[in-house]
Image (cartoon, rainbow, N blue to C red):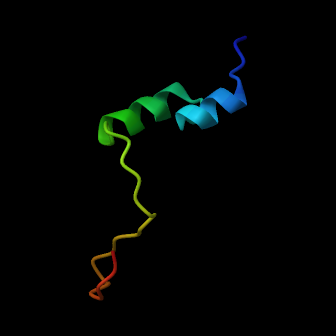
């Protein structure tokens, strides 16, 4: 069993779950940081 070093994961901004890390790298290849947001078709107000 291979155990990941938590400090290395946090410094690389990874989760330690290979499938999740690959998906994040695919949808955000430049590691752009944005505040979390929830999109809803019911909400018409201006947000981020």
User: From the viewer's perspective, is 24 left or right of 1?
Assistant: left
Identify the image quadrant of the C terminus.
bottom left
Instruction: Please provide percent x and percent y for residue 3.
Output: 72, 18
Q: Residue at x 34, y 80 (%)?
A: 47
Quarter of the image for residue 34 reads bottom left
Q: Nearer the viewer, residue 39 or 29?
A: 29
Q: Nearer the viewer, residue 33 or 47?
A: 33
Up-down relation of residue 28 to residue 21 (above or below): below
Up-down relation of residue 44 to residue 6 (above or below): below
Up-down relation of residue 31 to residue 1 (above or below): below
User: From the viewer's perspective, is 12 left or right of 30?
Assistant: right
Instruction: Please provide percent x and percent y for residue 39.
Output: 34, 70
Instruction: Please provide percent x and percent y for residue 2.
Output: 69, 13
User: From the viewer's perspective, is 45 left or right of 3?
Assistant: left
Up-down relation of residue 36 to residue 45 (above or below): above
Q: Residue at x 32, y 34 (%)?
A: 26
């Amino acid at each position: 069993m291979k155990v990941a070093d938590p400090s290395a994961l946090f410094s690389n901004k990874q989760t330690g779950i290979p499938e999740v890390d690959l998906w994040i790298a695919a949808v955000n290849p430049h590691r752009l940081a944005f505040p979390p947001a929830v999109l809803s078709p019911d909400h018409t107000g201006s947000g981020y």
